[in-house]
Image (cartoon, rainbow, N blue to C red):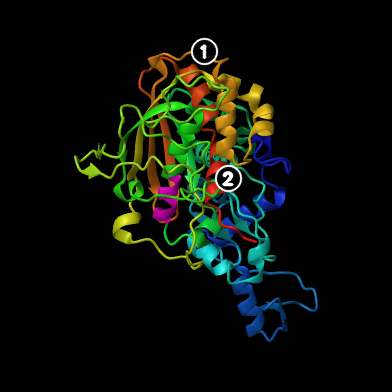
Amino acid sequence: MRSHFLLTGRGNTLTSYAASMLVVCWLQRCARPPVLPTPEQMMARHAESGGETCEVEGRECGYIVKGEPCKVPTENRQTLAELVRGFFDFCASLNFDTHVVCLRTAELVERGVFYKELRKTPEWKHFRDGPMVIQDPLNLGHNVAASASLELAQKLAASCTLAAEDMAGGPVGVADLLQAPLAKRLVERSVGSDVHRARIRMSGPELVHYPSALVWAREVCSILLQLLIAYRIDYKVAYREKEAASTPIADPSPYANSSTNVNPSLIADSSCNVNPSTNVDPSPNVGPLGNANPSTNTESSPNGDEVAPLDSSTVRPAPASGIANDFVSDDAASTRSRGRTLLVVECHPIKRTWTLRRRVSVEARAKAFDPDPLTVEKTMSDLSWDLADQVDKALDFELRLTELDGQNGLLALDVTPEKRGYSHTFRTMAQAFFDQKALSQLVRFYTLPDQS
């Protein structure tokens, strides 16, 4: 892992302790008889043998007074090579977006179930959520992989998949697995596609806060449309899931008008054109393309069904209020489907404002009257508008939001160019506007409940 920069102990990587816990979890979950027992099993054996127990923070714990050599009987007869290959297969199959690794019981628990149970314990206040969650078997309020990034989780799965494929082809030495070609093949696999994908998932507090993942997904749809307005990108909604389209969401900004509950800096007028600030050219048409009267316009779904029109006064979503803290499972028939389309938007960037984002970012944060992300993004677009070059139709793209896991709140945002052959320019734009980390932080800003 260290040779492929998955384990350094610094930055957004795994610590050696977290990597060791993955190995322990695999040895506890071997397909054939496990090599190691779980802490729960060891506790049971300790109690059966008359061992002493004590209570720590409401949990019964066992301890050994006299240190003795640990002899764990096992019937596992797998070779070391088979165990190593099994470990790679195990890591490649882990889905940290939807599951949590619990070493105390050697189980992979769904995030919703895990956080519902964790909320009942004192450890809830101290637990750090993250793209990867590996619960410490001794300190249950500690996520040993809290420092890991989403990119690292994806690279870990890809690296272990390649390593397992190499070992399946015949005997492979440890030195072979540490060579650079593995990292090179990872890069080669990621090149050649014009589609930019960003994944958005519910965090632990959101899983507990929202009654279902669909309610949260509806707010994500609204956030994405408001982000396009902030970027000053022309767009047309080709399809929006009915229930998502009919859910207006209030604006949390303290600057919002009390009668309309809409931020005046981002509100759309009757023609769906964003009111520009005084120092910006008002000529650009920013907003839904071809929707001169959104109150009477309707959209069609891929099946020809009429979809509720968008509410142009819905500007920025707020965290849902009045929702019970207990996690409520999604309806199996409506929200556990995989691959369901929630939103399809046809987009036309007007100017190359993304090329100036870094240049104006500091000034934008200083000028934004409201420090929330959408206001900052709009200010950045305003500052770079007059300096940016025009964009031709070649960079038009489609924005598609789909469910990867409706139960655990995992969404995929695919940004696809209408024309091929502009890979470098398109990917630069897509990564600037829809960066994985920045998009996740934006969604969490508006949907993460107040935990104070």
The crowding category of the residue bearing disc 2, from other C-alpha atoms within 10 Å (few below 14, some 14 to 19, many at least 20), is: some
Does residue 215 appear anywhere in the picture?
A: yes
The picture places residue 184, in percent across and down from the top left corner, at: 57, 26
Is residue 197 placed above or below 421 in the rendered structure? below
Question: Closer to the N terminus: mark 1 or mark 2?
Answer: 2
Q: Using the image as rendered, state which of residue 241 and residue 374 is in the foreground.
A: 374
Residue 409: in magenta span: no
Say which element carries label 2: loop
Say which element carries label 1: loop
The picture places residue 79, in percent across and down from the top left corner, at: 56, 52
Looking at this view, name the residue that lies furthest to the front.
259
Q: Residue at x 35, y 48 (%)?
A: 244
Residue range in magenta is 213-220
Q: Residue at x 56, y 47 (%)?
A: 253
Real-space Cα separation, disc 1 to disc 2, in angstroms: 32 Å
Q: Using the image as rendered, state which of residue 84 and residue 126 is in the foreground.
A: 126
Query: What's the amino acid at mark 1?
Result: Asp
Does residue 32 appear anywhere in the picture?
A: no
Is residue 295 placed above or below 429 in the rendered structure? below
* Marks 1 & 2, CB-CB < 8 Å contact: no
* Quarter of the rendering occupied by the C terminus: bottom right
Q: Which residue is mark 1?
A: 389
* Quarter of the rendering occupied by the N terminus: top right
Please give the label number shown on residue 304: none
The picture places residue 149, in percent across and down from the top left corner, at: 61, 42
Q: Which residue is mark 2?
A: 255
